[in-house]
């Protein structure tokens, strides 16, 4: 009998202690893990099934984690963007070109993961060129001494900022070399930069052609010289096109489609052009100075390319770049407009 009384007293004490903690404040909620049994978990009102982790958790804990995640996301994005800004920028003049460069990289609408894939290369190259300051190129960091892509980015930047073709010769990939030589000829206003292309004869001729073409689309046909055209093979379609652009006379085209497209033509001109259709449509937009042709006639990457060419050659306006859907292409368009509207670019040197 005495033993039963003692047991009863102990039970009462336990119930009192449990009741005190239960009713006097916060209590810990235990959500058992039912090894993937979602229905069993949801039968507890305090619990919620987290499918991506395959576990049963207290609802309050999930909400707290979500709230903390939002704060961290905002802070992390600010920290990520800080990595694109350098001390060299502080004393730069507020020129239109510098203001555009400082907008790079464009991150609006990008996730943290996408921002992490961006590099400050576009921004630093942009600022280096428009300010004639190769120190910005040194800010293009390499992952390691063997980072060939990073080395190429830095060499392009140095070539363009210093106007020194020797850096183009250090490039590892022909595609990057093309960007280096072609860009330098325009930035320096010197077609003879193309003479240095020794790895591909056709690429050298394309470089001459891009130089002349740039002058043409900028309404500077009067700056195209006979010497420029003589860089191209005698009797070739490209030389005929160069002379046609120089004289502004379609008769020099000799009925060559690739030359005729450089002059105003109706949209029907592009019918049946097959492989050159996208370029034909772009030329219709450029010759008529009508951006809607790019927007309404082409799609996806071809549309973006057309808009980028229009922004870079016809109106030099970043609001045109904003119509580009590809993040990479839009960032590149901003950089090109900043450089091409700067005081050191070919179009201004040839005024």
Image: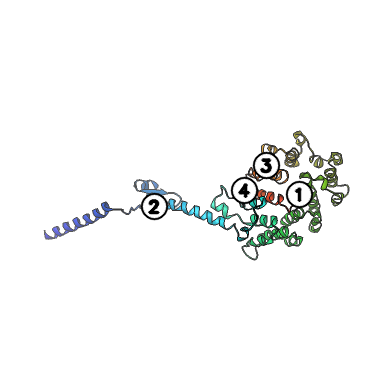
Q: Position of residue 44 (x, y in %)?
A: 34, 47
The tag on residue 347 is 1
Q: CA distance from mark 4 to mark 2?
A: 37 Å
The residue sitting at the right extreme is 234
Q: Position of residue 334 (x, y in %)?
A: 66, 49
Element assignment for label 3? helix
**What residue does disc 4 label?**
327
The tag on residue 61 is 2
14 relative position to 274: left or right: left
**What residue does disc 3 label?**
303
Element assignment for label 2? helix
Mark closer to the chain start, 4 or 3? 3
Mark closer to the chain start, 1 or 3? 3
Viewport quadrant of the N terminus: bottom left
Front in this rendered view, residue 40 or 115: 115
Q: CA distance from mark 3 to mark 2?
A: 48 Å
Q: CA distance from mark 1 to mark 3?
A: 25 Å
Instruction: Give the number of the mark in front: 1 or 4.
Output: 1
Q: CA distance from mark 1 to mark 2?
A: 61 Å
């Amino acid at each position: 009998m005495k033993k039963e009384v003692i047991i009863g007293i102990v039970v009462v004490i336990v119930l009192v202690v449990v009741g005190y903690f239960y009713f006097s404040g916060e209590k810990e909620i235990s959500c058992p893990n039912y090894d993937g049994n979602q229905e069993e978990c949801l039968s507890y009102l305090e619990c919620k099934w987290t499918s991506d982790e395959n576990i049963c958790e207290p609802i309050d804990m999930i909400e707290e984690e979500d709230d903390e995640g939002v704060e961290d996301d905002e802070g992390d994005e600010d920290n990520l963007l800080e990595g694109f800004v350098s001390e060299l920028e502080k004393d730069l003049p507020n020129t239109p070109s510098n203001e555009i460069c400082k907008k790079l990289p464009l991150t609006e609408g990008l996730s943290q993961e996408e921002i992490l894939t961006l590099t400050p290369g576009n921004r630093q190259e942009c600022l280096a060129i428009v300010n004639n300051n190769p120190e910005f190129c040194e800010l293009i960091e390499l992952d390691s001494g063997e980072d060939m892509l990073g080395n190429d980015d830095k060499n392009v930047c140095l070539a363009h900022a210093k106007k020194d073709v020797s850096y183009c010769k250090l490039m590892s990939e022909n595609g990057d070399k093309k960007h280096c030589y072609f860009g330098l000829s325009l930035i320096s206003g010197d077609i003879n930069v193309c003479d240095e292309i020794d790895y591909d004869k056709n690429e050298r001729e394309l470089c001459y052609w891009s130089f002349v073409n740039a002058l043409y689309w900028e309404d500077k046909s009067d700056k195209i010289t006979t010497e420029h055209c003589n860089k191209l093979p005698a009797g070739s379609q490209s030389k005929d096109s160069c002379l046609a652009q120089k004289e502004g006379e379609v008769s020099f085209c000799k009925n060559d489609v690739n030359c005729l497209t450089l002059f105003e033509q109706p949209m029907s001109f592009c019918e049946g052009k097959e492989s050159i259709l996208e370029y034909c449509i772009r030329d219709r937009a450029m010759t008529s100075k009508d951006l809607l042709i790019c927007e309404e006639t082409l799609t996806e990457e071809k549309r973006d390319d057309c808009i980028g060419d229009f922004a870079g050659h016809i109106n030099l306006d970043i609001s045109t770049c904003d119509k580009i859907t590809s993040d990479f292409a839009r960032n590149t368009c901003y950089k090109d407009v900043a450089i091409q509207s700067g005081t050191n670019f070919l179009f201004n040197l040839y005024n």
